[in-house]
Amino acid sequence: GRRAMGRAMGLAGLLLGLFLVPAVLVSTSLRHGAPQTEPPPVPAELELASGAVPEDSVWPLPQRLRTSPRQLQLAPSRFQLVHGAGSSAGPACGLLEDAFRRYYEYMFGQSRRRQRGHRPQGRRGGPELSQLEVVIESREPACHSHPRLGSSEAYHLTVTEPVAILKADEVWGALRGLETFSQLVHEDDYGSFLVNESEIDDFPRFAHRGILLDTSRHYLPLKSILTNLDAMAFNKFNVLHWHIVDDQSFPYQSIYFPELSDKGAYSYNHIYTPADVQLVIEYARLRGIRVIPEFDTPGHTQSWGKGQKDLLTPCYNGEQPTGSFGPVNPILNTTYDFMTKFFKEISSVFPDAYIHLGGDEVNFDCWRSNPEVKEFMKKQGFGNDYAKLESYYIQKILDIVSSYNKGYIVWQEVFDNKAQLKPDTVVQVWMQNNYAHELSSVTEAGFTAILAAPWYLDYISYGQDWKKYYSIEPLNFPGSEKQKKLLIGGEACLWGEFVDATNLTPRLWPRSSAVGERLWSSRNVTDLHDAYKRLTNHRCRML
Amino acid sequence: GRRAMGRAMGLAGLLLGLFLVPAVLVSTSLRHGAPQTEPPPVPAELELASGAVPEDSVWPLPQRLRTSPRQLQLAPSRFQLVHGAGSSAGPACGLLEDAFRRYYEYMFGQSRRRQRGHRPQGRRGGPELSQLEVVIESREPACHSHPRLGSSEAYHLTVTEPVAILKADEVWGALRGLETFSQLVHEDDYGSFLVNESEIDDFPRFAHRGILLDTSRHYLPLKSILTNLDAMAFNKFNVLHWHIVDDQSFPYQSIYFPELSDKGAYSYNHIYTPADVQLVIEYARLRGIRVIPEFDTPGHTQSWGKGQKDLLTPCYNGEQPTGSFGPVNPILNTTYDFMTKFFKEISSVFPDAYIHLGGDEVNFDCWRSNPEVKEFMKKQGFGNDYAKLESYYIQKILDIVSSYNKGYIVWQEVFDNKAQLKPDTVVQVWMQNNYAHELSSVTEAGFTAILAAPWYLDYISYGQDWKKYYSIEPLNFPGSEKQKKLLIGGEACLWGEFVDATNLTPRLWPRSSAVGERLWSSRNVTDLHDAYKRLTNHRCRML
């Protein structure tokens, strides 16, 4: 087993220019005063040997998985991924064609064996799996559309001699099934490719399974974002929550308002052009991943003010403007004229049905200092309750975005501040303190919720913190069955204060994989020892 | 300033295939519940602008640095690094020739400007610096030798029109001065290369400034080790403490005992061949870095037992051997025969005058369980004091290593257990608990000490922990002046339980830079705000 795994690693290592021992998560010794709360050492040999058993390597664990000890051989020179009889998708389905090639490469490594010699090689004698037939059952396979919150990701996979069959309603389920199939294929000690006869019935527990990337605190090059999308697909995540701008920088290059990035980005080159954005969206679509952009207002907008005059509130010290600016100025018509045009662009650039509108951490001090804002408060009868002013602003933004037929997600403060929200608003819960109670309140009020609070992966600590993320049970909050249904999923958030291209991947993966399995697999998949074995192998495969 | 820095970054980014904002350490906002103990946000613009001032970018800070506002231009097509008149080194000094080319590249970027067009371009008019003359003053420049604990790293650098002069006793000081000179050269807003007229007198505060890498818990590919040596040179570190083997794996390929890695390494490929080891040593030598290997015994040796029969102590349960093994068996003559031969090899493979012999964390349970060991204890009159048995073993190993004319470093337990140590033993202090007291005891007993305890960089936490490492004052322990002189330096240790090639660099740098400055610069260089500015720029340059 050890040699076999070493071999597989050698291949992956070669591809990446890295030679890695597969077990970064293995705490094999506690040398030199490391905290004594860690589990006892696991012998490396045992861990590596387990890689030979395919079901020890599937991540996230399917809802129903039966494998037989009977193994089928795969010959890379002959094996094919094809559209099955009766499928509504065919060669014109670019998404599946692209996925076939991608997964062929993952399984057999850059087609090297297809090219080696032209003499057809005979069968070795054992039973062989000759192809995987993919059958899309819905009349509309969705090859050219974008994944939605309601998209079906369910699939049914049977692996028996001589063909495996992968059935799914839509292409999104086929993508998930291809990922699973590729995880079942493994090499034995002699380098032969094998798969156990298996039957899998699978579907996600939660519909919204996201990763938040923050490209404002530090700019992330396009390549980092794409690499992350690959990793997300390996873990069956389906939402990239793109926290694209914030106080620190405005890298989004707007078509209507190019000055926003001209003046608000870290430099002329630290931007995402319209072509960049399209590339991210398409790369994600091909992997069944939605891209939800966040344009957070009225707070977290310092960088907006550089390229858009009069957008932010001037702060005062007594009678005098200080020269500093606060949140978006909610009392000017020009603000809403700008937002109307800006969100018209965003609504058309980003195909997803949802936009994240932020609304968190609004500091009221600057509003409070501004005489015109105070006058406005009086006129509106808001008294001294600036949460009402925030709600007034948010309400208008929600109306604007609604007029473009978009849904919206907001951070929990918007709900906490009692803004009038449409019933279809999605509330994202992030405050670590008593988040179960917040989930309870949000769903009791009838709103849909997303949980992020326990999965802030920018926080780091020594040791295997993935166990902490893994052990979270999202539905463990007080509420009725109906309330529980309103929790549509969760997100692992990697805020960018201390993250850039140099450390993004090792900080996010495989730690996020723990969240991935929690959101996909059945509620009762909680065995840490079993998860550890599978995650170790899964990391090796990802590398 | 911002644009200029963006430009310089663009270049560095291109070289690395990365586009990075230079300030991963900048905690510019504390969004979403981040700990409130962080300092207030620093505007990004201010930080970046400071990059234009050269003295804001030198790391570690020289002992004496005077810069004038007068700036000299450098023309990459004309500028030369040359051996100065009266230097004992010349073109035959491969080490300096190699360094000239390396630093030319760091300063001007892959000679791109030398190649662009052949028409000689005229002077722009301003004062120009045409060359850097390097003068080695000692009669023996040490071009072909290895750096030693006592090597001189002092240098004197004057930058005035039309030539800069770098004087050093030995090549080691010249390497440090070249690094400093390259840090003074910067680009202005128009892309011109400039250096301020300056005078620098510099030397290290401590002679031993090390980084510990652990290649046993996870194998590190050669490339990772070499990259780390580059980073060490950027920070004037001069010792690679190579914790090459441990319980988990034995990647060192021994010439006399190849079975040690054949059976003890993670795989056939996860090894360091003799040629690999030579490459590391030579790459380090060219950067003025010593390579001190650690072969830790009698504990931490599980991987040794796989390839060397009867080396480890069989553990017992009552009368029965359990099949497990403990530390090296100290009662057999074969053990010392093996060690004599093994350390003969190590002494010849590694040119440094010191070998690290480990000696930490010896668990006595297995020795206690073994009837023959118990018998031996009785015969030796050790009673039940197994520390005496450990000392007995260590004593013999020290004698073996001494016979090869090597000095040795040991972990603090060897001292704590009262082994009879030769006066020239170096004791490395690692236990975090009350390390000042330990330094006091070690030096009071007259031994030389190295401090590692406060610089265990495998421990991680959210935020700018570099400040914690930076704020350590190594001499802050009770003792006489004579005792203080016995502390020869320190090491930043990156144990490998959770580190491999995927995260080595971002985990180690720039956090280790804090330790680098503490060990090189004057005791009074403690201003965190100033350090922050310089470190931000230094990180950008390293990238």
Image (cartoon, coloured by chain):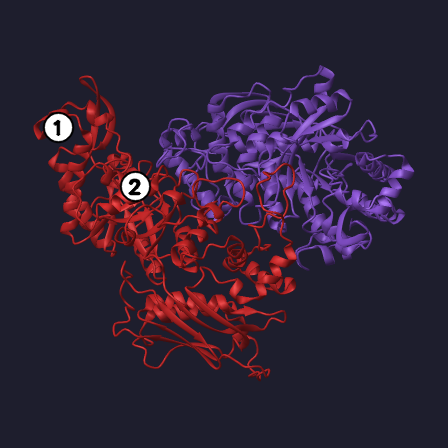
Chain colours: A red, B purple
Residue B351, percent from left and from top: 77, 41
Question: In the figure, is residue B418 to the left or right of A177?
Answer: right
Quarter location, residue B266:
bottom right
Question: In the figure, is residue A481 to the left or right of B347?
Answer: left
Q: Specify whether residue B117 is in view.
A: no
Residue A539, percent from left and from top: 52, 56
Mark 1 lies on a secondary structure that is helix
Is A358 placed above or below A380 here?
Answer: below
Residue under label 2: A438
Instruction: Looking at the picture, tell me which residue is in the foreground, A43 or B60.
Output: A43
Residue farthest along the top direction in this orientation: B480
**Residues behind callouts 1 and 2 on a single chain:** yes
The residue located at (42%, 48%) in the rendering is A472
Mark 2 lies on a secondary structure that is helix
Q: CA distance from mark 1 to mark 2?
A: 29 Å
In the image, what residue type sits under mark 1?
Answer: Met
